[in-house]
Image (cartoon, grey):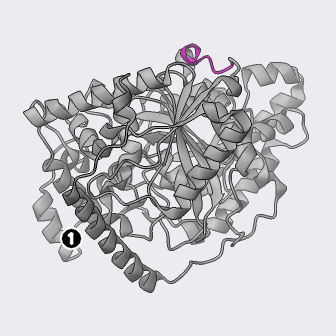
């Protein structure tokens, strides 16, 4: 790889002035939102049941060993959902009665002695452990709306492939969590279920589209869950909610049962269903199950020798247009990570890079999301049956008559304004994607990871993302590259909100991301209880 690709780019004066003015606007609007919402929101109910402080892996072990019963664990999490949901609005559907019957059946199987504890660990590693997922990943009999009003009464006829595999491994789905409208925005709010609020500060967003899932995990109301990610929809909610979330390598986990479905094979490669949990140790066994027959490609059980890894880091996108500057708290968190890795594994193993193509992350993502189907976001808002009239719906929204969200409609307009499939601009930006992909493949090899901000700011106030819509580009670029990436929490910042980074590796080197996530959890403490205020 040519060394010049790793050198800082000279920044034109016009771009510097533009970034400065954009930063001033951001500071002004942040001041306005703080006046509107106040310093912090309502306090979370305290976590009082020690079951809620256990990883899913630990709960599975205790259930197999009959130290806890599946019914006991499930009842505990049901109580927690009922306790926090009036405040957070993260759970939008439930199947408590059916889940309790399945939990009783799991307990009966364990007590029967039909299988030894070791056999159960092999055949059903998560036997009796409750699980949640978002309202776009199908669970038989549960709502399957994707936050779209026209689907408000639709229920899934079958489990998504990933959920079916988790069920086969013994997990018991018991609740469904909120999303953004059609899963294409990074705040979870829609006209079916309303808005979800952050457990660390209810005035802040939970991210999207797996925002309800990130929230229910951070509130300790579910042991673990499934998310999906086409532009950061696992990693942004994981970051904003202070938990772990992993977007797998492209085409490893089946997307069947996720709505909306991608328009093309390439879009399908950008989308990834993946695990979410408060504890890093849950990600690896979950991914092993969710990957099904493709798990062998990942070699997840192959040991990772951290001392032999090469740690690259990039502190920002280099000044992307209309993208917020990285918060001081997040810059300091990155420095702490770099200092820890340098001290523990040697400074020669840690290297700062600056990949210039990343500055165009948003443009690259939008271009690569185009395809030859002729369909865009307005077709998704029409339930993949027709294109809505976006301008008419905006007029209806102004008088309170539209069943779509304002941000859903403006996203459709923004989407329609992007370059068209096959145009010269499209080809240029696809080539940029390919160039960046090749650079990173050569840089990372089979023993390197890139540590990069998950997002440039901590969780914004509700509706504030409308004024900084392009910030998702920090995660979106990874989707169109196809690499695996893990969101890793790094404690709380000066505002009492979660900090974090994402760890990116080469194709099918997911185990490197997960191993580094586990190391950073050991070093920085991982998930922090949300009722504890600084």
Task: Give the residue displayed 48% in from the left and 56% down from the top.
Answer: 178
Would residue 126 be found to the left or right of residue 367 on screen? right
Q: Is residue 202 above or below residue 361?
A: below
Q: Nearer the viewer, residue 411 or 532?
A: 532
Would residue 338 be found to the left or right of residue 420 on screen? right
Task: Give the magenta-colored segment's residue range.
Answer: 295-301
Position of the N terminus by quadrant? top left
Q: Quadrant of residue 428?
A: top left
Position of the C terminus by quadrant? bottom right
Q: Position of residue 532 (x, y in %)?
A: 72, 69
Would residue 399 be found to the left or right of residue 328 on screen? left
Residue of label 1? 397
Q: Is residue 325 visible?
A: yes
Task: Give the residue displayed 16% in from the left and 66% down from the top.
Answer: 394
Would residue 188 be found to the left or right of residue 521 on screen? left
Label 1 CA crowd tier, 10 Å (few <14, some 14–19, many 20+): some
Q: Position of residue 419 (x, y in %)?
A: 13, 42
Task: Give the residue displayed 49% in from the left and 55% down from the top.
Answer: 211
Q: Position of residue 321 (x, y in %)?
A: 26, 54
Q: Nearer the viewer, residue 466 or 308?
A: 308
Residue 296 colored in magenta in the image = yes
Q: Position of residue 344 (x, y in %)?
A: 73, 37
Residue 197 colored in magenta in the image = no
Q: Is residue 251 visible?
A: no
């Amino acid at each position: 790889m040519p060394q010049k690709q790793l050198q800082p780019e000279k920044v034109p004066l016009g771009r510097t002035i533009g970034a400065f003015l954009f930063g001033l606007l951001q500071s002004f609007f942040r001041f306005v939102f703080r006046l509107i919402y106040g310093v912090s929101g309502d306090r979370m109910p305290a976590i009082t049941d020690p079951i809620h402080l256990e990883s899913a892996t630990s709960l599975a072990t205790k259930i197999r060993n009959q130290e806890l019963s599946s019914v006991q664990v499930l009842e505990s999490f049901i109580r927690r959902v009922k306790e926090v949901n009036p405040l957070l609005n993260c759970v939008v559907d439930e199947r408590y009665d059916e889940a309790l019957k399945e939990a009783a059946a799991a307990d009966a199987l364990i007590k029967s002695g039909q299988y030894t504890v070791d056999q159960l660990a092999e055949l059903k590693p998560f036997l009796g452990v409750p699980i949640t997922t978002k309202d776009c990943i199908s669970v038989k009999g549960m709502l399957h709306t994707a936050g779209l009003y026209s689907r408000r009464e639709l229920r899934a006829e079958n489990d998504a492939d990933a959920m079916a595999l988790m069920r086969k491994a013994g997990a018991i789905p018991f609740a469904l969590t909120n999303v953004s409208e059609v899963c294409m925005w990074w705040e979870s709010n829609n006209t079916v279920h309303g808005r979800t609020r952050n457990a660390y500060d209810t005035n802040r967003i939970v991210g999207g589209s797996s925002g309800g899932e990130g929230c229910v995990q951070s509130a300790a109301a579910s042991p673990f869950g499934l998310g999906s990610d086409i532009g950061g929809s696992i990693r942004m909610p994981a970051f904003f909610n202070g938990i772990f979330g992993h977007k797998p390598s492209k085409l490893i986990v089946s997307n069947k049962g996720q709505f909306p479905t991608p328009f093309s094979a390439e879009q399908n490669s950008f989308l990834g269903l993946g695990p979410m949990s408060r504890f890093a140790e849950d990600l690896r066994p979950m991914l092993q199950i969710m990957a099904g027959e493709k798990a062998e490609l990942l070699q997840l059980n192959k040991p990772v020798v951290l001392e032999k890894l090469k740690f690259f880091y990039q502190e920002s996108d280099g000044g992307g247009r209309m993208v917020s500057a990285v918060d001081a708290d997040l810059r300091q968190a990155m420095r702490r990570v770099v200092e820890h890795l340098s001290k523990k594994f040697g400074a020669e193993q840690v290297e700062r890079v600056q990949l210039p193509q990343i500055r165009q992350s948003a443009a690259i993502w939008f271009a690569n999301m185009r395809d030859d189907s002729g369909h865009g976001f307005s077709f998704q808002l029409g339930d993949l049956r027709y294109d809505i009239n976006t301008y008419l719906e905006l007029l209806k929204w102004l008088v309170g008559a539209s069943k779509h969200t304002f941000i859903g409609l403006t996203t459709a307009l923004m989407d329609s304004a992007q370059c068209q499939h096959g145009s010269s601009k499209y080809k240029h930006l696809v080539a940029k994607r390919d160039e960046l992909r090749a650079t990173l493949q050569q840089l990372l090899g089979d023993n390197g990871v890139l540590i990069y901000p998950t997002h440039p700011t901590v969780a914004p106030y509700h509706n504030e993302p409308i004024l900084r819509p392009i910030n998702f580009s920090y995660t979106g670029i990874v989707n169109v590259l196809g690499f695996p990436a893990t969101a890793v929490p790094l404690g709380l910042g000066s505002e009492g909100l979660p900090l974090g980074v994402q760890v990116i590796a080469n194709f099918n080197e997911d185990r490197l991301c997960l191993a580094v996530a586990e190391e950073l959890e050991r070093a920085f403490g991982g998930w922090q209880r949300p009722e504890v205020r600084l």
